[in-house]
Image (cartoon, coloured by chain):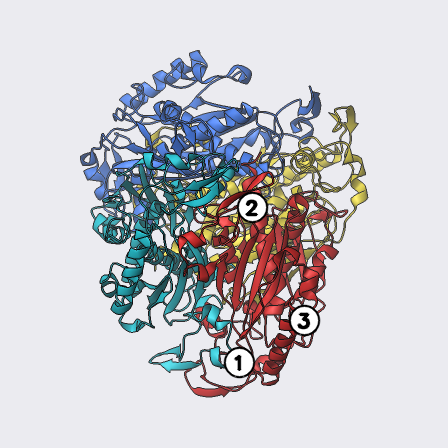
Chain colours: A blue, B yellow, C cyan, D red
């Protein structure tokens, strides 16, 4: 296990999907930040199940309690303990998987690695594990907002083969994103996505998708070459989210098909600062932010747990057919949006604090 | 700067492209490993410039010296100091860029972050920085080979828009990869890639590409959820390589378009172990290796430094035209192959040592 | 703040003395360890206030709840969340110190470092912070016991100027230590210590002391030179305990007065292993355990908070007299005993896991 | 092995006593620091052998070369590679110890931990390992000096049973310390120490001692509770130095004998800041510097390698007599002075950079 992330702004998460509670400890948060549970609850609300009938109906209020590190509405500079109790546990739903590892789920690998695993619902491999990240990310976002008005907005750009047209990033807001339960801000595309997710759910299947994330007003200079380049830590952060399979920044895989003369981002004066005309770099050059918006995409596979019967094998290698019970998302990407934003915030705030000593 | 990678097998690199030397310190290498300079020199040779006329003609022998940590051909368990002197430095080639940050290069961001930068050739942002990684990676590979016959082979799957057909991974060897200077093992594709790279070079332009990497005989159980999942550390490692813009594992971005019933990898008995019929997971489930081959891809943008004139701006924002001098690769992906392999080896060996205490 | 300790067995603590709760997250605990709250409660009971009239009368049950990481009495290999609620908070007792930093307490330095501080009782600088350490240490002890019957016993060797005679270490047990509320196993000395502490308490003063710690059956080979030598990490661990001012191992400061011919520990066969005749090394040579008992001592200053009036200054520099109210220990060393043991356990278990990959 | 120290200012050392070279990589050094080899050479000169006939006659120039990270006399913010070649290696001197582990030396524990060890002179357990620390420490000192005129001066306060009287710390300088080869600034005491060391050397014995260290103009606020308290990291740093056995800060072990009313340091206005009348705290309260001078002491045991015959055992347990050959210091404390200073500088600079983000 490696449940701590960050160098100066450090988040440690804990909790299984069907245990008593999940949560996080945030260490290194600057002191005197105005902070209350309400600041955190908003993003938790965007992450929680049961928001629409596109998502798992598990019913969790996901109410966060701040256990420490805050007094009279201000952070003390000491570790912030964050706790969310699990209420709607239904261990019984998982009896069947005791002997049958779900295909493409973590049942098999956890059992092999640890010689034991949580009996229900995926334990730490559950999406429920991300609650601690989102709670911590909300704190990170607050710091980024206060220090340089930095904003992070992610949205669903693809569900299955349905792809949103290019979104005008200048005007992208969370409100626009949340207008559809799919979290795709293009309404025509969103409608098609709803159809696809509903059909998929009704067939007891699941479907993948892509989340695009945009970070605006990122100061120049964030990122710590050579191993903690900004894109490297963003990549680690995103590939640590359950079900993610790919990460690309700026031009990404499409950039690999291009020539340098077309791909290079020429410099140009933008007011008092030097900017770039295009942004194939995605806001990062040489591992360091260049002041342009950071744009990256994260690929999510279709959820592994599906109701459709699958021919697979027991731990002992016996052929069986498995049709999963329990409550599962047919498509995780709408709920992945606040998780992607939170992990981006955790990377950026840590890099900002790490850069501070250079800018005194 | 963050120049150290790994938790138990730790690599610290140093050196600018036009300074006295580059190198690395490897701390945590198990004792009593048979090791000599020759073990390291092979991969350094595959990485070094001047291997073919597709690459920069900079002439460096890249001869490694082991400074410490080895006695009578055996590692002592103490830090291994590795040194490669720079010989063919030509600082003069870079006089022009003192005032003009190269578009999409790190000149601008290093200057902004540190308030100073190496006057020549990119400093730490140069491909030359990767020598320490490759030297350390060669040691990591030796351990992986000895402990479980684990092998890592990468190859060029795409240059620009030229894409290799699906390669039969069972038979993939470094010899087959090195048969062409493009490091594409499909000979017909390799020939087209040579043409494209030569044309690109002659036009003083550059071109991107994709490296695919295959790791065989990876034991089950490597990876440390939730933040150091195996794919998360691989993603960090790959995105820390100069010019990389994307990472995907297994089905990757294509997997995001699929339905779960098609994407899931059903379990099946494979001899004495449980394997999977397909490998959309790319050898990793829930952040932990599952015993199947690990397959991932890394996207590289076209090199930023090109001889073609580009309209850009000086640090002060004055419009200028820049046509870079110096010796540059028109396409980095052939030389990126051993770098990708080395970073994969560093991730895998660290995860193997971190898993050890669980398997006593 | 730096609230995480350990490399593979990692403990993160949180909580202020007068907030909602204190606790810890233990990450990296091996899986399949039998563990329940009862295993932890015993050491918490030895640490808690109100055990005798020598200690602060603050009334806390200090009941621990395991929030995660354990199922059906076995650890899962996932992070173990540990929570202890604060019940007997009396913020009002500290109103006076809002303007007057207590001499030799952390009021002043926390305020200067963070620009804010917990309004009551010391916040993170309170002894209450050590609850998370002791809870985590109890888990560490259980692993050490199971793996190699390693035992850790600390005792009070000095209170003020009253010093225990040399204790026969072979027979030292926690039962013998706990026979007196002073935790000095020499009964004649213990009686004198009780007198001194009671007189000190009645005068509203405080007194310091020394805790000696003995670790038996430590395997050969623990410790990671050169910066994480075993004694170096023990020293860090002990000096991180509130009120500690010194650490010495083996001969310690007395050894500095000796000649090598008298100080050296000659080797001698002990059954099937090589041991040493004397143990001036304190069980550690070159930063690595040598198989002999580890013996070290920790000096604790007299508690800073005293009822006697002291002439001091407000934050603004105004001269005042301060006579502290609230509930305070006249002498911390009896309650420091389980804290010292716990920190020793955390160091040893981490070193044991770090050594594992070498002994496969 | 754990050869890296620091969180933001990170030092990684390498090298055995009789290998090709020793050195260090300093990562995280702020950019634009004026730096040349001469800045480093001074402290290396104070550390090197052969300075007087009180020390080992091993003849090493200990000339440092900066391999990277500096251009035109200014640091680049990139890792600084530091190299010192070993010249006067005499492996033959150590043939005898192949089978006989030196009592109280690291021969035995290294062999047991790693299953192998450097054949000569102690390898990483040699004092020669500290060259990298001293080189890195010189850079740290330069930063501390430039940023806040912070100065660090250590001296020998005890050799064997000869103890210097209380030194007036206000006037303590390195020049005064270096006036005697013993590095005791009290001349009468120094003369007695010379006698004792010479007698000890002539008897082929060795003797221990204590180094006291004083850090002036340390800003308020350095130290990261709860595990990286300033005194905790100082303790780790000091106990990581070869042959150290104890650490105490401020009142230390003597403080454990005192009553709180006498021990507490009352606050008093000192010009524009709040200071303390006494300094039993040694400049640190609650793990954080309080602006008063930091004062600590480090105990060093007598060197283990002595020419006097000792009755001991071979690795196989056979009784033998060992009279060590080779060149050894009869007393390490004079040469330990710059090592103590360097480790203090490494701790303080790291803490200063870690504090920076709070003081923006």
Residue A102 left/right relative to B79: left
Of labels 3 and 2, the one closer to you = 2
Horizontal and vertical percent for residue B74? Answer: 54, 68
Horizontal and vertical percent for residue B148? Answer: 43, 58
Dot 1 lies on which element? helix
- Disc 3 and disc 2: Cα gap in Å? 32 Å
Q: Chain of mark 3?
A: D
Q: Which residue is mark 3?
A: D181
Horizontal and vertical percent for residue C144? Answer: 31, 60
* Residue C154 picture quarter: bottom left
Residue B153 left/right relative to C45: right
Looking at the rendered structure, whether the residues under marks 1 and 2 are on a common chain is answered as yes
* Residue A98 picture quarter: top left
Q: Earlier in the sequence, mark 1 or mark 2?
A: 1
Q: Which residue is mark 2?
A: D291
Badge 1 crowding class, 10 Å Cα cut-off, few under 14, some 14 to 19, many 20 or more, is some
- Disc 3 and disc 1: Cα gap in Å? 31 Å
Q: Chain of mark 2?
A: D
Residue A316 visible from this viewpoint: no
Q: Which residue is mark 1?
A: D97
């Amino acid at each position: 296990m490696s449940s701590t992330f960050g160098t100066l702004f450090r988040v440690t998460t804990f909790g299984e999907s069907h245990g008593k509670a999940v949560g996080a400890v945030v260490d290194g948060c600057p002191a005197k930040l105005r902070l209350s549970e309400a600041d955190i609850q908003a993003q938790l609300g965007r992450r929680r199940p049961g928001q629409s009938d596109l998502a798992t109906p598990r019913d969790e209020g996901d109410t966060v309690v701040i256990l420490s590190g805050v007094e009279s509405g201000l952070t003390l500079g000491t570790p912030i303990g964050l706790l969310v109790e699990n209420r709607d546990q239904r261990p019984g739903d998982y009896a069947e998987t005791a002997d049958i590892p779900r295909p493409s789920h973590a049942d098999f690998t956890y059992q092999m690695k640890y010689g034991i695993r949580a009996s229900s619902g995926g334990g730490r491999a559950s999406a429920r594990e991300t609650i601690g990240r989102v709670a911590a990310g909300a704190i990170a976002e607050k710091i980024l907002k206060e220090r340089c008005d930095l904003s992070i907005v992610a949205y669903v750009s693809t569900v299955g083969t349905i792809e949103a047209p290019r979104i005008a990033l200048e005007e992208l807001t969370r409100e626009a994103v949340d207008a559809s339960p799919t979290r795709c801000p293009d309404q025509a595309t969103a409608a098609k996505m709803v159809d696809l997710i509903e059909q998929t759910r009704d067939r007891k299947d699941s479907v993948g998708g892509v989340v695009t994330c945009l970070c605006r007003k990122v100061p120049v200079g964030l990122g710590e070459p050579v191993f903690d380049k900004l894109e490297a830590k963003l990549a680690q952060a995103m590939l640590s989210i359950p079900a993610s399979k790919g990460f690309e920044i700026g031009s990404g895989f499409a950039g690999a098909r291009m020539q340098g003369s077309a791909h290079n981002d020429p410099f140009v004066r933008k007011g008092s600062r030097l900017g770039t005309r295009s942004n194939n770099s995605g806001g990062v050059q040489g591992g360091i932010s260049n002041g342009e918006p950071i744009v990256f995409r994260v690929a999510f596979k279709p959820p592994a747990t599906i109701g459709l019967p699958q021919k697979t094998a027991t731990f002992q290698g016996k052929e069986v057919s498995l049709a999963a019970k329990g409550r599962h998302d047919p498509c995780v990407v709408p709920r992945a949006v606040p998780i992607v934003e939170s992990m981006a915030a955790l990377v950026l705030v840590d890099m900002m604090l790490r850069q501070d000593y250079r800018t005194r």
